[in-house]
Image: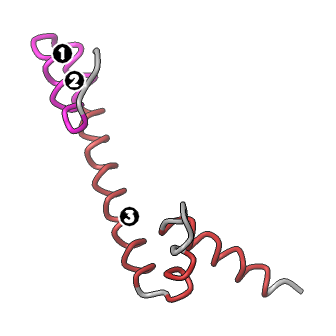
Amino acid sequence: MGRVAKGRFEARVRDLAEGNPMLEAAANPIRASRRMLRQELAGLEKLLRNHVQQDPVCQTLMTMPGVGALIALTVKAALAAEAVKP
């Protein structure tokens, strides 16, 4: 397959499989599944970013170097879980 630039993976797979019915039959459903998974992931990431933007605790945590939205929310959830332990 060689090196593929970001955003060109699907086109590269299509180009390589084109003309080979067996490869097309195998690659097309995989490409479609990959496309849908990427769309779902983008939606989840958007929900995460929107939630964190509204949360002052997460905003404070994200002032530390290396702490992004996912880490901030994970730390907040872990602290909340510890707070409710008997």
Q: Answer whether residue 56 is magenta in the image.
A: no
The residue furthest top is: 20
The residue furthest left is: 19
Instruction: Indicate the secondary structure of the residue bearing disc 1.
Output: helix
Q: Amino acid at mark 1?
A: Leu
What residue is pinned by disc 1?
A: 16
| Callout in the foreground (1, 3) | 3
User: Which residue range is magenta in the image?
Assistant: 6-28
Disc 3 and disc 2 in contact, CB within 8 angstroms: no
* Precedes in sequence: disc 3 or disc 2: 2
Q: Residue at x 84, y 83 (%)?
A: 85
* Precedes in sequence: disc 1 or disc 3: 1
What residue is pinned by disc 3?
A: 45
Q: Amino acid at mark 3?
A: Glu
Disc 1 and disc 2 in contact, CB within 8 angstroms: yes
Q: Which quadrant holds residue 29?
A: top left
Q: Which quadrant holds residue 18?
A: top left
